[in-house]
Image: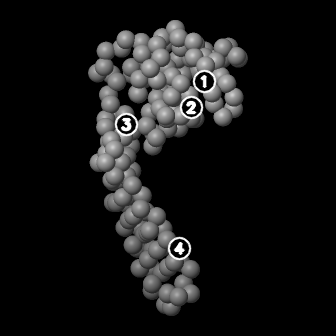
Amino acid sequence: MNKEPITIIGLDKLKKELIFLKEKKRPEIVASIAEARSHGDLKENAEYHAAKEQQSYNEGRIQEVEDLIARANVIDVTKINNDGKVIFGSTVFLKNLDTNEKIDYKLVGKDEANLEKKLIFFQSPIGKGLIGKNKNDLVEILTPAGVKNFEIIEVKYI
């Protein structure tokens, strides 16, 4: 069983999702199945089949989240001495040398990644290109959109 790195916030979100799926979603689906059953013939009952499909998806997600929690390797970067190196969980402030645009990313686990919130998977092309680099380094990263050139302005463990 491989451990998956995750931030404290990511683990908390997974635990909240698990509680929601088990304590709120599961009973709703059971009630939907009971309601659909009361309508008679199950062979031609679309509501029943939809509810059973929803139940299957929900139970699968519960198993997936429980597995992720069991394999979680929680990394709290706030407790690590910041030496300016880009590591899992660090927030990296970059300057795109091609466009002069300044951007920042937090390197996170797969289930936490959300580009809109500037949370990128540490094993994505940009994540892999940044891990192990230091403040003030110039970095060339091959992405699906082409080569990107960055300067690491700041690395924070927040």
Q: Earlier in the sequence, mark 2 or mark 4?
A: 4
- Work out whether residue 12 can be spotted: no
Q: Position of residue 93 (x, y in %)?
A: 52, 17
* Disc 3 residue crowd, few under 14, some 14–19, many 20+, Cα 10 Å: many
Residue picked out by circle 3: 6
Q: Position of residue 40 (x, y in %)?
A: 49, 90
Q: Nearer the viewer, residue 56 or 145?
A: 145
- Please, is residue 9 above or below residue 138 in the view? below
Coloring scheme of the render?
A: one colour
Residue picked out by circle 2: 125
Provide the secondary structure element on which disc 4 rests: helix
Q: Earlier in the sequence, mark 1 or mark 2?
A: 2
**Mark number for residue 119?**
none
CB under 8 Å between discs 1 and 2: yes
Marks 3 and 4, how far apart at CA: 34 Å
Q: Position of residue 41 (x, y in %)?
A: 50, 91
Marks 2 and 4, how far apart at CA: 39 Å
Amino acid residing under circle 2: Pro
Q: Nearer the viewer, residue 6 or 25?
A: 6
Q: Earlier in the sequence, mark 3 or mark 4?
A: 3
Residue picked out by circle 4: 50
* Disc 2 residue crowd, few under 14, some 14–19, many 20+, Cα 10 Å: some
- Please, is residue 109 above or below residue 29 in the view? above
Callout in the foreground (2, 4): 2
Q: Position of residue 27 (x, y in %)?
A: 37, 67
Marks 1 and 2, how far apart at CA: 7 Å
**Mark number for residue 141?**
1
Marks 4 and 1, how far apart at CA: 45 Å
Furthest toward the bottom, the residue is 41
